[in-house]
Image (cartoon, rainbow, N blue to C red):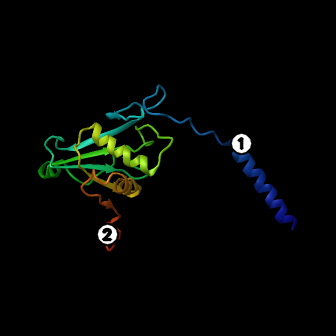
Amino acid sequence: MITVIGATILLGIIGWIYQRLMKAPPPKTIYGLANGPPLTSPRVKLHDGRHLAYKELGVPKEEAQHKIIVCHGYENCKDMDLPISQEVLEELKVYLLLYDRAGYYESDPNPSRSVKTEAFDIQELADRLELGSKFYVIGCSIGTYPIWACLKYIPHRHFYLPPLFHYLFNNASFTLS
């Protein structure tokens, strides 16, 4: 019994010393500020004053037959690696718009962020960039929940909403009704 108590006290002291020796995490850096990383992407200013960063791939939007907005996952951003070449995008006349969701990388955070605001961010981004009244929306990983929000809150604005799943889920069948 004394051995258990002694070991517990010893581990407590070691833990306390370890915490005292640990350095505090570095201060959070915000893109575009004096002490933060520089902004490298174009950004769109939304009606509430926030900015969303974006990246365009494929043909110019004026020539595109298919305009697609891509929502990234949890640990990704607009610079995620998509396994599609520029030649294929040009051949199919596809315009891809990848954007940083609110609070990710070069986009400003939204303190009142919700599923609904994600859908309206997509709608406003499409309006500001003049994509037209209809567009495709694709989501990867956790970026699929804004896609379902688009289905609920702006169903009149999109053509089709395919959430992307991991390749191991090839037997899954889903219906949108």
Q: Nearer the viewer, residue 41 or 151?
A: 151
What residue occupies the far bottom of the structure in this picture? Answer: 171
Which is nearer the N-term, disc 2 or disc 1? 1
| Nearer to us in this view, 65 or 170 | 65
Instruction: Return the x and y of residue 34 as percentages of the image width and height.
Output: 47, 25
Image position, residue 1 (x, y; %): 86, 68
The spot of residue 72 in percent (x, y) is: 36, 50
Q: Which residue is mark 1?
A: 20
Secondary structure type for disc 2: loop
Q: Which residue is mark 2?
A: 175
User: What residue is drawn where x is 44% and y is 33%?
Assistant: 31
Residue at 35% x, 55% y is 147
Q: Nearer the viewer, residue 42 or 48?
A: 48
Question: Which of the image's four quarters has the C terminus?
Answer: bottom left
Q: Disc 2 marks which amino acid?
A: Thr
Q: Is residue 96 above or below residue 42?
A: below
**Dot 1 lies on which element?**
helix
Position of 111 compared to 5: left or right?
A: left
Question: Disc 2 to disc 1, how far (Cα)?
Answer: 55 Å
Q: Residues within 10 Å of mark 2 (few under 14, many from 20)?
A: few
Q: Nearer the viewer, mark 2 or mark 1?
A: 2
Quadrant for residue 172, please give it.
bottom left
Q: Position of residue 25 (x, y in %)?
A: 59, 40
The amino acid at mark 1 is Arg
Residue at 84% from the left image edge and 60% from the top image edge: 6
